[in-house]
Image (spheres, grey):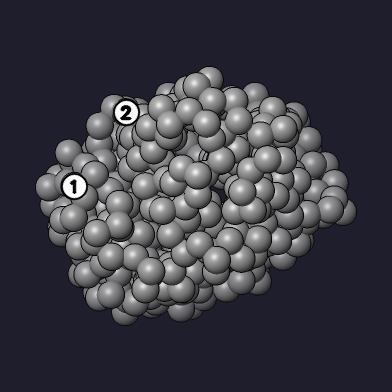
Amino acid sequence: MHQDARGHAVALSNPAALDAYERALYALQTYRGDPLAPLDEAIGLDAGFAASYATKALILATFFERRFMRDALAALDQGRDALARGTQREQALAAAARRIAEGAWHEGARMLDRILAEHPRDIVALQAAHLMDFYRGDALNLRNRVSRVLPSWSASVPGYAYVLGMHAFGFEECNQYPEAERAGRRAVALSEDDAWAVHAVAHVMEMQGRIEEGIDWYRETRHVWAGGDNGFAFHNAWHVALFHMDRAEYVPALEIFDARLAGGGEMALVRVDATALLWRLRLEGVDVSARFGAVADGWERALEDESGFYAFNDFHAAMAFAAAGRREALTRLRLALARATSRAGSNAEMTLAVGLGVCEAAIDFCEERFAAAAEKLAGVRDVANRFGGSHAQRDLLTLTLIEAARRAGLPRLARHYAAERLVHKPASAWGRRLVERIDAPQARRAA
Ligand SMILES: [Fe+2]
């Protein structure tokens, strides 16, 4: 039987298909190019190559939109005969992909972990599970799942750097910043093409308020993350914009929005970042109404199909609709959220625990019910990891809470939450700016 580059038996008859498969995994690991095209090529070369179908399904599923879940199920149907003759590992990958595509996200992640127990070098299972940990806000497993397989890896195994890059992000989400930075820098040094590791180190700098270093880091590593074929470049660019936001440099932040985020309206992941950046700019008093209108258009186009699929996305749609004054879209979104709470699958609990509250808070904020917005955000902020995303992304909840409290005439409450930032990010200008604004009540309405 043939083996892949990490030593797993693979069911196939044409070895040329394996080359295409490994190219797909490289694209997956580096976020460079389209990983699906070489998988289709592999299937074209050998229709019996079971791993290609399972991998395709997992990649589609971890794009994390309802439409791609349907595509993932179609890939599994397409490969039914091949998978029936596949190895136990290949069948297990397919089974995990199916459960994720059906909405059982926690169960799917556990199934991937069982594969890793048997095959700790299964990079497809590891990366898919890592992304599922991110979407599910499972910080411990972002770190520990990688820790569990790390003893089976070394620099001599192809793809080791990307495992370190995942470990770096896991450490960061567990607030272990020195460990995160060490692993991330090592990954970048080993691979020179690990955009996920670059991102992990940038997260450390973001969380520690090392703004100058963050901008320098992204400048030094542009060759790793910024290329036109890099599917993750939009998100790294978003982090660069956040660093500029900290320094109140709104023009470069808007330039990044226009260059990297405005045109990505057909992908939910890009719409999330576009919305989050505009919302931060809006909180800072920058007029972004026209841009918000365009982003709200993107959410509206996806509303019928995607609303109620993932609470984290729904929250960003709610912000865009509320900021753009789309009342009808908000009504439809609210109905979708209500339906989501009674549907089978992991998102119902996410919506109940976090999604409903933060969506209503965003609407309250835009309709100037600031005390109500602050109340709702204070209620869910500390459990908001349960609807996914990173600390840096969920920081938007705290920024909104502070501004809502300030505008509600609750300066003590606003200062209370701003204090976290001053302590955790002592070199950051954003925290000081927030406190100055809270302490200048006569200026607050002009902002
Ligand atoms: Fe990030």
Residue 4 in picture, x, y percent from top left: 42, 45
Q: Is residue 110 left or right of residue 188?
A: right
Q: Dot 2: few (<14), some (14–19), or many (≥20) neighbours within 10 Å?
A: few
Q: Nearer the viewer, mark 2 or mark 1?
A: 1
Where 278 falls versus 116 (above or below)? above
Q: Residue at x 63, y 43 (%)?
A: 86
Q: What numbered label is drawn on residue 192? A: 1
Label 2 vs 1, first from the N-terminus = 1
Q: Amino acid at mark 2?
A: Asp
Q: Relative to the observer, which residue lies in front, 78 or 432?
A: 78
Q: Nearer the viewer, residue 300 or 237?
A: 237
Question: Which residue is label 2 attached to?
Answer: 229
Kind of residue at badge 1 = Glu
Q: Secondary structure at mark 1?
A: loop
In the rendering, at what x and y percent does residue 404 appear? 54, 60
Q: Relative to 395, is 195 on the left or the right? A: left
Instruction: Give the image location of residue 151, x and y in percent.
Output: 37, 73
**Residue 69 vs residue 35: left or right?**
right
Quarter of the rendering containing residue 49: top right
